[in-house]
Structures are given as structure tokens and as C-alpha cells.
């Protein structure tokens, strides 16, 4: 197993560098727009362009990988992403930044797709769980470290754009110099959203809700910090602690969801998110240490909702459908993440900075209440036909669903080729 993980060092290194840059860029742009005087509504719409790009990238990026192979595709997406970041520094305009966020989302999804399909090529049923676990840890660490790089330069200047661009360019180095053989690209299967909704509506609703609250937080969290008077180091610590806390409760919540009804766990998570969010709205100005404690609790709970919803949905589908179902759930998350920032921004217009957590509290409480009512009224739908174990997951691209250790390995044939799997 150590030898297998060692073979992925180049990819893990590329992921860490990439997500450090992505984490820095998202927080920096949001804070910069707040400092420049843009309204929360404008900031929410502009920043949500990234999530719209991830949706589009999920449909089209695999075609690029199919045509030119993994390494060339990675270089292409990294170049586009770097150029997009640099272009941000040329214009301070909501319209141009919105278009660039869309382009960045597409390119980053392509980068995820290359890395994840490459990881899957070297995984089998005996080691997939550990491979995806390391991938999760590296991803969260990269996103978390990126928050602290906000202190590396003045937010008003161009240097943070340059630092982000450098990171995105450097993520090319491990992939371009690896000796690993390029793998085949996993087929992105079609899925029926109506059939998914009819079979496991609460799982799909859970992914949508996770997108709403996580998209809103990532986009407007820095704006919230700026509006309540936090310094740049304070905002950096606030965002970094929340992101890194996403790993704290993954295992204990996963254990609960494997032992008890996942509907109960999802309802509990939704209500817990609501309660913590309300506590933040009431106590956010008491002390920074209290705010930091609450946001760590928030991150630990909020970032577990998506993997529990994914596990719940897979309980009702056979292993052969895991890739298609997970792709649909990623799409559901992306839709929620696209809608969450503008909606939360509207709440901030009426309630001030606390409007962000008012929106999150409403989303969590509505979800928790609906799941509780659904469970009581539809007990016949609660018996899982294909029970699976919880797997901590971070949404990225449909390619990661093939890496899911709950899925069955796809048989390979000698006559298969990249073009055979790229349809």
C-alpha cells in the first residue's frame, strides 16, 4: 500500500498546490470586492460564476481529456486557469470578473477530472478507500493553507493575483514530470434526475442544501468577516479554521450514519447547522475567540452533510449505478452552490453581515424539518436496498465518483482504448 501511495506523490503534490491557489483566490476575490465597495449582491453573483463553471466543466472537460490525453489536458486547463487569474488583475470590474470566474470554474473542474481519473487508474477495491482518504486530506489541507496566504501581501494590490498565478503554474510541474503512464478516461455516464428524485429525494435534497450553505459560506464568508470589522489576518484565520475543521467530524459523523438511520443523521446535521449559525448571529461580536470556536463547530458539521447525503442515496441503488448517481449528486450540489451566494447576499442586504448565517440557518432548518417529516410520513421508503458504508467525499468533478470505494471495479479489456471510453 505504501508503494501504491508513493506512486501518487506527484498527483497529491499537484492537488495540494492547485487547491492552495484555488483556496486563496476565492477568499481573496471575495474580500477584495468587499473592500472595493461592491455590494453583497454583486459579490454573490460574480463569485457564483465559479460554481456555474464547475457544472459546465463536468459536462465538457472530459472531451478535452479524451482528445489529447491526461498530461496535455492538465497543461491546457492549468494554462487557462493561470491566465484567468492573471486577467483578474487587469480589470476591477464585476462583469469581467464574473466571466473570469466562470472560466476558472471550468478549468479547475478539468484539472480535478485529470487528477481523479488518474488516481482511479491506479486504484482497486482493496485500496480505493485509502487513496481517496489521502486525496481528501490533501485537498482540505490545500484549501486551508490557501486561506492563510491571504496574509502574504496587501489585499488592495496585485501581488496576491501573482502569488495565485504562480501556484497554479507550479501545479503543472509534478504532473508534467511524472513517469507514470497516462490512464484511460472513465466514461461519464448519463443519469436520470427524475428517477433519482423519485427513489431517494432526501439524498438529492441534501446535496442541494450542502451546495447552498457551502457555496454561500465560501463566497461570502470573507465579506462577513470584513463587514464585522475583522482584520485581514483575522479573516484569514476565520476562513482557514473553518475549512480545516471540515475534517474533524468526518469520521464520527460517518460512524453514526453507518449505525443509525441516515435520515435521522441528515436531519440532525441540518438542525445543528441551523443552531450553530443562529449562535453565530447572536454572539459574533462578543469576542473573536468565541466566533472562532463557533465557526470551527460550524465547519465540522456543515462539511459532513454532503457525504452523508451521498451515502444515503447510494443505499437505494446497486453498485453498477454509483458513478451515474454520484455524477447527478455532484450536479445537484453545483446547482445549490450556484444559487446559494446570490440568495445569501440578498439576506445580507436586509440583515447586514449576519444575513449570511440567517440564510444558512434557514436552509439548514428547512432541510432538517423536511427530512424529519418525510421520514415520519414515508416509513416504507426508509429500508435501504443496497446499504453502503460512509465515505468522506469532497465535491469536485464527476471523475471522482469512479474512485469511490463503494463502486464496483470496471473490467478492462485488451482492446479497450481511450476513445472507447470517451463517449
Image: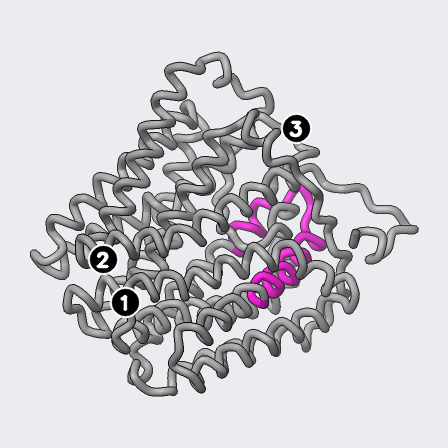
Which residue is pictured at 10% across the width and 58% down the height?
A: 285
Q: Are marks 2 and 1 in contact (CB under 8 Å)?
A: yes
Mark whose residue sits in front, 3 or 1: 1
Percent position of residue 386, x then y: 60, 24
Residue placed under numbered mark 2 in the picture: 349
Q: Residues within 10 Å of mark 1 (few under 14, many from 20)?
A: some
**In the rendered image, the vertical position of residue 190 relative to residue 350, given as above or below:** above
Q: Quadrant of residue 292?
A: bottom left
Task: Give the extent of the magenta segment.
Answer: 107-135
87 above or below 237? below
Residue situated in front as seen by the camera: 39 or 373: 39
| Label 1: which secondary element | loop
Reading the chain from its start, which is encountered first: label 3 or label 2?
A: 3
| Residue 39, numbered circle | 1
| Callout in the foreground (3, 2) | 2
Mark 3–mark 1 Cα distance, whole angstroms, equals 47 Å
The residue at the far left in this view is 286
Sequence-earlier tag: 3 or 1: 1
Sort mark 2 into few (<14), some (14-19) or many (20+) by Cα contacts within 10 Å.
some
Q: Residue at x 11, y 51 (%)?
A: 283
Q: Can you identify the residue that label 3 sits on? A: 318
Q: Position of residue 271 (x, y in %)?
A: 28, 34
Q: CA distance from mark 2 to mark 1?
A: 8 Å
Amino acid at each position: 500500500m505504501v508503494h501504491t501511495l508513493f506512486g501518487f506523490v506527484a498527483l497529491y503534490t499537484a492537488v495540494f498546490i492547485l487547491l492552495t491557489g484555488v483556496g486563496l483566490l476565492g477568499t481573496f476575490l471575495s474580500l477584495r470586492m468587499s473592500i472595493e465597495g461592491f455590494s453583497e449582491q454583486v459579490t454573490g453573483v460574480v463569485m457564483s460564476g465559479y460554481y456555474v463553471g464547475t457544472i459546465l466543466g463536468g459536462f465538457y472537460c472530459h472531451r478535452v481529456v479524451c482528445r489529447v490525453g491526461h498530461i496535455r489536458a492538465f497543461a491546457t486547463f492549468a494554462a487557462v486557469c493561470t491566465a484567468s487569474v492573471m486577467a483578474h488583475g487587469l480589470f476591477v470590474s464585476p462583469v469581467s470578473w464574473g466571466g473570469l470566474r466562470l472560466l476558472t470554474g471550468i478549468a479547475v473542474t478539468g484539472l480535478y477530472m485529470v487528477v481523479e481519473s488518474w488516481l482511479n487508474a491506479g486504484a482497486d477495491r482493496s485500496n480505493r478507500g485509502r487513496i481517496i482518504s489521502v486525496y481528501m486530506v490533501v485537498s482540505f489541507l490545500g484549501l486551508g493553507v490557501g486561506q492563510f496566504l491571504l496574509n502574504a501581501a496587501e489585499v488592495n494590490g496585485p501581488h496576491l493575483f501573482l502569488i495565485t498565478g504562480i501556484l497554479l503554474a507550479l501545479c503543472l510541474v509534478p504532473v508534467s514530470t511524472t513517469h507514470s503512464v497516462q490512464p484511460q478516461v472513465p466514461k461519464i455516464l448519463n443519469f436520470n434526475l427524475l428517477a433519482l428524485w423519485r427513489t431517494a429525494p432526501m439524498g438529492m435534497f441534501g446535496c442541494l442544501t450542502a451546495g447552498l450553505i457551502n457555496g454561500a459560506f465560501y463566497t461570502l464568508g470573507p465579506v462577513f468577516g470584513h463587514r464585522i470589522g475583522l482584520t485581514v489576518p483575522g479573516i484569514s484565520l476565520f476562513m482557514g479554521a473553518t475549512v480545516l475543521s471540515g475534517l474533524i467530524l468526518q469520521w464520527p459523523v460517518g460512524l453514526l450514519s453507518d449505525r443509525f438511520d441516515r435520515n435521522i443523521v441528515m436531519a440532525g446535521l441540518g438542525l445543528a447547522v441551523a443552531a450553530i449559525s443562529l449562535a453565530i448571529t447572536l454572539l459574533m461580536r462578543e469576542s473573536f475567540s468565541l466566533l472562532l470556536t463557533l465557526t470551527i463547530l460550524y465547519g465540522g458539521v456543515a462539511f459532513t452533510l454532503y457525504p452523508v447525503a451521498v451515502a444515503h442515496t447510494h443505499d437505494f441503488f446497486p453498485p453498477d449505478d454509483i458513478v451515474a448517481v454520484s455524477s447527478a449528486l455532484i450536479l445537484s450540489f453545483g446547482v445549490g452552490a450556484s444559487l446559494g451566494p446570490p440568495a445569501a447576499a440578498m439576506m445580507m442586504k436586509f440583515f447586514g453581515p449576519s444575513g449570511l448565517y440567517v440564510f444558512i440557518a434557514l436552509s439548514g432548518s428547512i432541510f432538517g424539518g423536511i427530512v424529519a417529516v418525510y421520514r415520519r410520513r414515508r416509513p416504507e421508503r426508509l429500508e435501504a436496498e443496497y446499504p453502503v458504508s460512509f465515505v468522506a467525499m469532497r465535491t469536485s468533478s464527476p471523475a471522482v465518483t469512479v474512485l469511490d470505494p463503494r463502486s464496483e471495479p470496471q473490467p478492462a479489456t485488451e482492446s479497450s482504448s481511450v476513445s472507447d471510453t470517451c463517449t
